[in-house]
Amino acid sequence: MEKKLVSSLREAIELSGLKSGMSVSFHHHLRNGDYTLNAVMAEIANLGIKDLTLNASSLFDTHAALEDHIRNHVVRKINTNYMSQGLGRRISEGLMDEPVDFRTHGGRPRDISLGITPIDVAFIAAPTADCAGNCSGKYGPSACGSLGYAFPDAMYAKKVIVITDNLVSYPMQGWSIPEIYVDYVVKVDAIGNPQGIVSGTTRITRDPVGLIMAETAVNVIRHSGLLKDGFSFQTGAGGASLAAASFLKDVMLKENIRGSFASGGITGYLVDMLNAGCFESLMDVQCFDLKAVESIRTNPRHQEISAMQYASPAAASAVVDKLDVVILGATEIDTDFNVNVHTDSNGCIMGGSGGHSDTAAGAKLSMIIAPLFRARLPIVTDHVSCVSTPGRDIDVLVTQRGVAVNPKNEELMLRLKDAGLPVVDIRQLKETAERITGVPAGIKRGERTVANVIYRDGTLIDTIKSI
Amino acid sequence: MEKKLVSSLREAIELSGLKSGMSVSFHHHLRNGDYTLNAVMAEIANLGIKDLTLNASSLFDTHAALEDHIRNHVVRKINTNYMSQGLGRRISEGLMDEPVDFRTHGGRPRDISLGITPIDVAFIAAPTADCAGNCSGKYGPSACGSLGYAFPDAMYAKKVIVITDNLVSYPMQGWSIPEIYVDYVVKVDAIGNPQGIVSGTTRITRDPVGLIMAETAVNVIRHSGLLKDGFSFQTGAGGASLAAASFLKDVMLKENIRGSFASGGITGYLVDMLNAGCFESLMDVQCFDLKAVESIRTNPRHQEISAMQYASPAAASAVVDKLDVVILGATEIDTDFNVNVHTDSNGCIMGGSGGHSDTAAGAKLSMIIAPLFRARLPIVTDHVSCVSTPGRDIDVLVTQRGVAVNPKNEELMLRLKDAGLPVVDIRQLKETAERITGVPAGIKRGERTVANVIYRDGTLIDTIKSI
């Protein structure tokens, strides 16, 4: 085990055998507080290694230094599931010679496990580890909770390097990723800035439009026929989604409904629902706030899941396929219910699917919550500028001005109409918005493909053009 | 998930696509109480499937029905790590056309993970499971504790069938093996007889010879230089080994030594040592008694490990390689310190390596405890009739008449002599025994090879001939 613990990132990289043209990977649980990707890439650049494929489960603005590594040909290709707007804009402007391949949180482990996107060296930022590489995100000064997205990297990469700022005696208690996968361990001063890793608290919206949408969303769930004992649920960390979770909790407690599980990125609101008895279990692939981190550390019913178990179509089964209801966001949705979460109103990359299309495909009821317009631009269009999630997987759009049901889900349409909910045709929502904002000018797209959008089953679902 | 839960073993076998000539696997945590291997093999025989390779981590007398399946050509080949004497005798008599391949508890997962012994269909007896196949040995009427040996089967078999008598709601809490590996789930009335699965209690020896050996063993450990803070330890479930653990506990408490971990098959004695603060953690690949099962269920410091993490030479690292001291048994040991745990004094198969050679290879101090003679037959011989563990990995033999140190370990020899322990040449122990029992007649071996003994690195270390 002495052999695994090396003195520096540089030594670990050298021992791993990393060479120009190979593939390196990173997970994103430290989010915008992550120090490790930049530190590793700086060492790689110093070593003169070039033309790498970078496979990162997500990329944040803190990784802006990648721009230089791309210009200097240290990074030739990017595979990721999400990219925040700083780097996204540069990519959209044509920074890279090769298009970025966007996957989903389920598609990434699928393609890693099938050998479609092989990883030569995986770098795992671990809030706690021992000298053999047993590691966890639950403990330590940089605790992030679940390490779900790092599992495929650990299991399938040719070499695995664990980077930690909290090295403990062997064997650590409560590892998530076992030593059997880990080749080298590096102790550094800090793997991240705790303030950027997780929010202190995630907060529900105070915006009246958001609150109306949240209330409507919960009414849709109530009348969907799915809200009964055994109910399973996922929602994001956006303000309106959190408000919906909060309202849903009240309904479940009032009606004494005991759900089975909530899944996905976990917030304190879902922890509250677990503790209140709304759910038997949380299935956690990523923690969004400190309350979630504390809960996964202390409550055995708050369970860590790998990215494979969360959403991989190559797994024998995955959690997303047992979901009753998922609440999702959209930057655009078109009259065929196709959803865009990759690009903004200028066609510029500012996101990615993450688990969007995985949960939409799996859940019995996939709901988009979105305001009718943002910054005077309608959300509903004739054709989304990028298809992130196909309309066939979306059941309902909830806005502040009404609820549009995908015509393929006739039963839901009838149920919601019977319940007196404001069901409207999605084209009517588009017209309502356009009456207020005017018809927006079309986006002028460039000619070059700057990104491919790869659906969870490996097929190309759309491309993103330069701006 | 409905698709996974099928109505019968027969349906699961049919859906798995099992055909003649393929390979099936079983784990042995239900030990002599296991019902599942017999039930599965009976269904396979009923289906007319023949010429199977049976890969079982261990086989017990409760699996005597295998004799018929071998005679009827349902089973053509056996790969296992241990075989108790009922079936062992039949194999030694020449029951099978092909030799049994014996591996070790580390070599088996190695060869499964490397594709050397591929598994077509793995059958996992699970004391608790949900309809997606998340499963654990910690809970349920047939609780056995750790499912460590079942992990490679689950992870590498082409199809995985979970058999449970305690089907719980999805998602179960505290699974060991996740749903991502499981193709089918079958609910049966009982997977085993709890009285045969684990002992109610394992007990230390009351035999004065055993107590003397245990006391000497602990004195060897005390004076080895290894018994200090961070100490790690493994011992078996034999009466003298347990007595040694009990005496060691007293020494550690008296001298205020805080060890790091104990590993392997876990008994209540090691649980007591954990709870008394002798160790920080238990690393459990198999539970031997009810106290161990209760502990792994309730104490987070009592940690389940897979067979890979326990001992696989193909893993990036394994627990056995961090051991300070292991106490092991022997049916024979020769003057070169080679140990036999496969055959009895008649050359008849009655055991197997299990983790014997894995821990011997990994531990800094590998100790054999054995009486000088059993049933008037000396334990020390010129040449063991079967080499299970090579003498290079054995450091010391403890008997009631003295301690023999392998000459390769000069430092230990000096330490023990300095401490006044009764250190003698191993040839002297042989002569002492033979003075009492007489020189035993050599075993008359048959001509046919009935078993191969495959060392943990995949090399053939010995063969066993028919009797």
Image (cartoon, coloured by chain):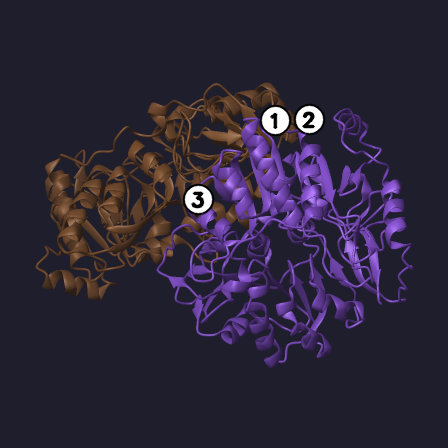
Chain colours: A purple, B brown
Same chain, labels 1 and 2? yes
Mark 3 chain = B
Q: Which mark is residue A225?
A: 2
Residue tagged 1: A228
Question: Helix, strand or loop at disc 1?
Answer: loop
Q: Quadrant of the C terminus of chain A?
A: bottom right
Q: Which mark is residue B193?
A: none
Question: Helix, strand or loop at disc 3?
Answer: loop
Q: CA distance from mark 1 to mark 2?
A: 8 Å
Query: Left of A312 or right of it: where is A162?
Result: left
Query: Left of A452 or right of it: where is A35?
Result: left
Same chain, labels 1 and 3? no
In the image, is residue A341 above or below residue A321? below
In the image, is residue B388 above or below residue A70? above
Question: Helix, strand or loop at disc 2?
Answer: loop
Image coordinates of residue A393 in percent, x first then y, are 77, 40
Mark 2 chain = A
What residue is at 76 percent from the left and 43 percent from the top? A399
Image coordinates of residue A309 in percent, x first then y, are 59, 43
Residue tagged 3: B103
Image coordinates of residue A135 in percent, x first then y, are 46, 56
Residue B252 visible from this viewpoint: yes
Q: Nearer the viewer, residue A320 or B138?
A: A320
Mark 2 burial class by Cα count in 10 Å: few <14, some 14-19, many 20+: few
Amino acid identity at mark 2: Gly
Q: Which label sits in the foreground, 3 or 2?
A: 2
Image coordinates of residue B81 in percent, x first then y, are 42, 40
Amino acid identity at mark 3: Arg
